[in-house]
Amino acid sequence: MVQSTCRLELLLRSFSFHTKPLNWRAAVARVLLQKPHSFTKMSPSHPRSYLGHRGKLALFYLFCSLTGAWGSQVLVPQRVNAVLGKNVTLECRVEVASNLTLTQSSWERRLPSGSVTVAVYNPLYGISIPPEFLHRLYFRSPSSHDATIVLGNVGYADVGIYTCKVATFPLGNTQASTTVNVLVEPKVYVSAGSSALIDGGNDTVVATCIAERARPPAEVSWESNLFGQSEVQLFDEANGTTSTQVSYLWQPTRHIQGHALTCVVRHPALQRDFRIPYQLNVQFAPDISVVGYDGDWYVGREHVQMTCKANANPPANHFRWIRLDSEMQEGVEIMNSTLLFLRPLQRNDSGVYRCEVANDINLRSRDVRILIQDQSQAERSNSVVVAGAVMGAVLALFLIAVFLVVILTARRTPPPPAFTDKVIDLPPTHKPPPPYSERAPAIPLGVHASQVAWLCQSRRADRQQPTAARPGPPTARSPAQRPSRLQWVCHESGTDRVYINHREHYV
C-alpha cells in the first residue's frame, strides 16, 4: 500500500513539474527550489501554501526512500587485475527492485580532467560506445540485471578507476566504482653462466634465471638438491616494470654431470607457476678404463686385443698406446684406442702397457701389466685336477695296504687259552712259586705232542688220588730237587697248569 501510494504520488508530482528526475535527491531539490508562482499555478486556491506543500513533498520522498519502498543496487569488484595485451572483464551486476524500471546502464572512466563515458546501454535505444573504444570494448550480455563489459588489448593507459552507473525510474541513478590495475606478464628464460663448469673448480655461476619486465616484480627461485647459493638482483625499467635476475652459484664436480636444476617463477599474471629445467654441463678430464685383458693370456693364444675407454666431457680427442719396459713387439698394431695382437702371443709379450687419453681439459693415462703364461688357465686347472687324482689314488692304495697288514697280523696271533681247568679258591695271600732258575732238558724229538698231553693228564690223575691210598709215608720235596723230565715237559706245554681264581695264581 505504501509502495503504490509513493509511486502514484511520485508520478503525479513528476508530470506536474514536466521533468524527469534523475533521483529522489534531485526531485526533492527541485521541489524545494521551486518558485511561489509555480505552486500558484498548481494550486490557485492556496497561493501562500507553497512552503507547506514543498515541505510535505520533501518529507514524502524521504519517507519512501528510508522505508525501502523502492531501491536498486550495483555490485562491482573492488579491484580488477588486467594483463598487458590481453582482455579484461569488468563485472557489473544490477539488482533492481520490482517497483523500478531500468532506463539506462553505463560505464564512465575517471580522468584528471573529469569523467568520460566509455559505454552506454539503453533498453530502448541500444548500445553506444565512443570511437576510441569501439574496436576493443563490448557488453558481454547486456540486460536489466547485467552491465558487464569486456575491454580488449589492455595497455598501460587503461589503468584507472571505472564507474558502473544504473538509472532507474522513478528512483534515479545508482553507481559503484572499481579500480583497474594492469599487470605485465614476465618473459622468463634461463641462461648459462659466463664461464664453463670445470670439475674441482671454485664456486661458479652455474645458471641465471631471468623474469624480464614484470609488473609487479616476479618472484624467482631455484629448486635443486645441490648445496649451492642464490643471488637475487632487481632492475627497474623505464616503462614501470621490473626485471628479476637470480643466479645460482655452486662448486662443480663431475659426479653431478647431467643433473638438472629448475627455475620457478611466480607472478599474479600467471595462472600457475612457471618452471624451466636446466641441465648441468660439468667438464672434466678423461676417466680411463682398459678392457680386453682377462688375466688368461698364454703362449699361442690368438686374436687378443686391449681397448682403452674414456669417460670425458668434452669427449676425448687423443688416444695413444705405448710400452714402458721395452719397445713394442712386431705383430702388434695400434688402431685408434685399441691395441691389436695380429699374431699368436709370445712369451716376450709380457710387460707393462700404457694407454694415454686427452681432451680439452687434461691428459690422463692408465697402466696395465700383462703376464703371458705357458699354459691356459683351463690347462693349468686340468693339470691340478690330474695331480690331485693321482695323489688321491696313491693315498687310497696306501690305506688299503695298511688295512690288509693289520688284518693279517691279527689272524696270526694265537688265541688265548681256554679256561677249562679246575678252579681252586685259595686265600688272597697265596702267591705263585718263584720261577725255575735252571732250564730243564728239551723234549726229545721223537715224542709227539699228543703223547706228551696223554702222559701229563695221567700224571695229573695220579696226583688227584687220595694220599691214603698211596703206601708209605709222604716225603717232603727239597727246594733244590730238580724236576723230572716229564714234569718239566708238562709244565712247559701248559697241560700241568691249574687255574685257581680270577687272579690267575699258579700252584
Image: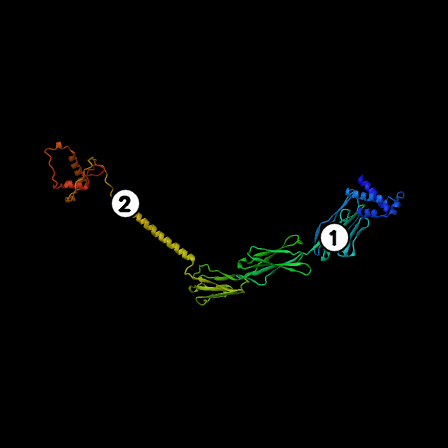
> Which quarter shows the C terminus?
top left
Q: Identify the residue at the far left of this view.
A: 472
- Secondary element at tag 1: strand
In this picture, residue 328 sits left or right of residue 252: left
In this picture, residue 49 sits left or right of residue 179: right
In this picture, residue 252 sits left or right of residue 492: right
Q: What residue type is labelled 1?
A: Tyr
Pinpoint residue 50: horizontal percent, then vertical percent: 86, 45
Place residue 85 in its image quadrant: bottom right
Q: Which mark is residue 162?
A: 1
Pinpoint residue 340: horizontal percent, then vertical percent: 48, 64
- Per the model, the C-alpha gap separating discs 1 and 2 is 131 Å
Q: Which mark is residue 410?
A: 2
- Secondary element at tag 2: helix
Dot 2 alpha-carbon crowd within 10 angstroms: few under 14, some 14 to 19, many 20 or more: few
Q: Which mark is residue 56?
A: none
Q: What residue type is labelled 2?
A: Ala
Instruction: Report if residue 40 is visible in the image.
Output: yes
